[in-house]
Image (cartoon, helix red, strand yellow):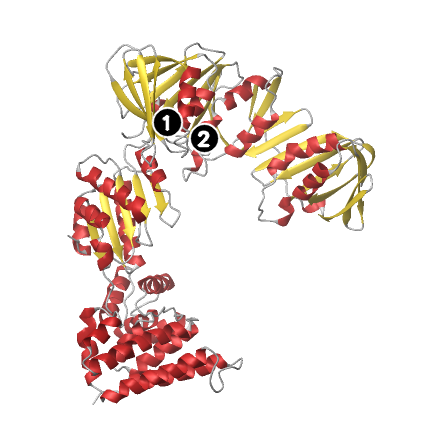
Amino acid sequence: MQLTVSRPDLLDAINRVIGGVEKRQTMPILGNLLLEVDADQLKLTGTDLEIQLESECPVDAPQPGRTTVNARKLHDIIRAIPAESQIVIRQEEGFVIVQAGHSVFRLACLPADEYPRMEATTEEHRLVLGQDRLRAMLDKTQFSMAQQDVRYFLNGLLFEVSPERIRCVATDGHRLALAETDSQQSIEETLRIIVPRKMVMELMRALDRDDNSPVELLVSTQQIELKLAHQRMVSKLIDGRFPDYERVIPKNNSKQVHVDRETLKQVLQRASVLNTDRFAGAHYHLQSDRLAIEAINSDQESSREEIPVHYQGDDLKIAFNISYMLAILSHVDDMQVRMDFETPESSALILPTDEDAIRTRYVLMPMKI
Amino acid sequence: MLAKPQEFEQRLARGLESLYVIGGDQPLLVQEARDGIVANAREAGCEERLRFEVDGKFDWGALESQGASLSLFASQRIIDLRMPGGKPGRVGSKALSTLAERVKGGGESDIWIVSLPRLDNQLQKSAWFKALAGAGLAVRFNDVPLAQLPAWITRRAATHGVRLERDAAELIAGRVEGNLLAAAQEIEKLALMDLEGPVDAARVAQGLANQSRVDTFALSDAVLDADRQRGLYLLSRLRAEGTEPLLILWVIARDLRALVALAGNDQAGFKKTRIPAFLARRYQARARAMPPGNWQRLLAGCAEVDRCIKGLGEGCNTADGGGRVWALLDRVMLHATRPGR
C-alpha cells in the first residue's frame, strides 16, 4: 500500500471519521482507523460498533492495499504537519510510514482483515429531505436530549415520520423540544425511530446548513444510514419506547405572554453572572404588560430586572432553570417569542410568534418556588 | 424518635411517606430498607429516581435545584441521597434542615431517602438529623450481636428456602465475623447450589471463603473478656488483612493504660484514654481481676513492640522485622487475656 496526498485533503477526511473512534475502547483495533487504497482514492473508516463513519479523499500515485493505524496518533501527526505539505503514506515491514518533507513517522498497525465493521443497512424505508432543512430540524431540538440518563431512550432524538410530515423530538425529562416540517415521504405507516445522541452530533457536523440539495436517509429496524458526497455514516438505533410526548405538550395554557426574544435573553445572561450553576433558576413575576426576573444565588447575592411584555391577565409567579430557558431562546429564530403559562407548577409552552417552514414547540417544566 | 426496623416495615406496608432517614452499621440492612422503599414507590407508579452520593466536594446547591426542577413525565420522583460519611457540612446541614421544614409543611411532592452510616450519638445530636427525624420516618438498623447472628442466619436462609443445621449457621457466623453482607452472600450462594435437605457445617465449609473483616476494637473485647483464643485469632486476621501493627498497638496500649489507671483508682487517668464512660464498669472489673503490677508490666511490653515497629531492638531491623512485631503482639495479647484470679 502506498499513496501521496495533500495535507488539507487528508486532514478533512480524518476529521470526518475521528468522531466515530472512542477514546477508550474494548478492543485495541477499535482505536484504529481503517485505511483502504484503491485505484484513485483513500477510504477511511472509524467505528465504535455503535456508529461507523467513512470518508474518502483523492490521492496521487496509489498502490492499492489496506491496513489499520491508531486514529488519534495519525490525527495528531497530520495536524502538526505544515499546512501545505504533501504526505506520503506507505506500508513497510509491519509498520505504516508517514512522510512529509523531512519528517518521517513510523506507526504500528494492525491487520485490516480484523477490523470490525457494522453490517450494511438493509433498506426498509428511505427518507428524503433537504440537507439544510434536516440540519435545522436537528439543531432546533438536539440541545434538549438527555445525557447519560438511565432512561437510555432519552439519550437520543426521536424521528417521527408520517407520509406528510417529519417531526424531531428531544427531551431530558425537564424540557422538551419539537420541530416539525411538511414533507412528502413515501411511507405508509408512521415511522418512529430514536437516533442516538452521538449520531445526531455527527450529523450536525456533517450536514451543510446552506445546501438545500436533498439527502437520503436509509432506515432499517436497527440502523440508520446517511450518504453524502465522499462520506457515509451508519448508526445503530436506540431500541426503546420514547415517552408519549404529545401528552406533556400543554394545549390550554391561558396566560399568553409576548416578549422580545433578545431582551429576555440578555436579561437571563446577566442573571447567570451570579448563578453559574447549570441547575440554577430564576423567578419570573408576571404582571400586566411587565415581567420582573429575579435570581438569587446560594450566597444570597441577587439580581432583578424588569422588562416590558405584552400580557393581560392575573399575576403569576413562576421559576425556571436559567440555562434551559436560554437554550430555548437561542434556538428560536423569530424576534418575538410567545410563552403560554398556566400555574406555577404546570409546564410552559414556548414558541416563535411567526411560523416558519419548520414549526417548533418548546415545553419547559418550572422549578418549585 | 427513632423507629425500629419492625415498625418501619409496618409503616411502609401502610403507605409511602415523603421522607425516610435510614442508617446503621450494616450496609446490607440499610440497602435492603432502601430497596424496599424504592420497590413500593415503583409499584405506586413513581418511575424516576435521582441518586446523589455526598462526598467532600458535593454540590448541595445542585441537589437543591435538581430537587426543585419538576419533571415533565412524573409527578413524583424518588430522591436517593446517600451520605456514607454522615457529615453534610455547614451548607449541607442547612439544605437538609430546609428539606425537613418543607416535608413538615407538606410541601414536598417527591419521596426522599436519606441513607446514613452508623447513627452514633454525635450524629443523632446534630441539628440537621433532629430536623430530619422530626419531619420524616427515621429508622436505625442495629448491628446483629454476635450471639444472635446464627439465629439471624438461620432465619434468612429459611426465606431463601435453605434449611441450615445449627452448626452450619454457627460456622457461617464465625467466618463472616458480623459482616452481614458476606453472610447474606453465603446464603445466596447456598440457595443457588440448590442442595437437598438440611445443610450441615461440612457442606458449608466446602464453599465458604474466609470473608470476615475484623475490627481493631474487637481486640478490646477479647482483653476485657479474657478470651485468649479470640484475641490471638483476631490478631492473625488483622495481620492477614494487612492492618498496620501500629494501629493495633495503639488500641491495646490504650486499653492497658485504662486498666493501669483503674487498678490504681485513678478516674482522671481513665478519662484521659477517652474510652466511653459506659464501658468503665467492664474495664474496672477486668482491672481488679489481676494483680495491680500486671497491667503496668504489660504496658512496658507494649513499649518493646513500639520500638520494634520503629526498627529498634533485636531482630527488628531486618527484612523479617515484621514477623517479630507480630510475635511480640501475640505475646502481649497472651498476657493481656490471662484469666483473672
Residue type of the residue flagged with mark 2: Met
Q: Is residue A39 above or below residue A106?
A: above
Callout count: 2
In the image, taking residue B234 as reference, residue B33 lies left or right, namely left
Provide residue B147's location: percent of width, then percent of height. 23, 72
Q: Do badges 1 and 2 share one subunit?
A: yes
**According to the image, label 2 marks what residue?**
A145
Looking at this view, name the residue that lies furthest to the right: A61
Provide residue B123's location: percent of width, then percent of height. 24, 55
Is residue A123 shown to the viewer in this render? no
Disc sitting over residue A175 in the figure: none
**According to the image, label 1 marks what residue?**
A244
Q: Is residue B171 above or below residue A90?
A: below
Judging from the image, what secondary structure is the residue with disc 2 in? loop
How would you rate the neighbour count of disc 1 (Cα within 10 Å): few for under 14, some for 14-19, many for 20 or more? few
How would you rate the neighbour count of disc 2 (Cα within 10 Å): few for under 14, some for 14-19, many for 20 or more? many
Front-most of A30 and A116? Answer: A30
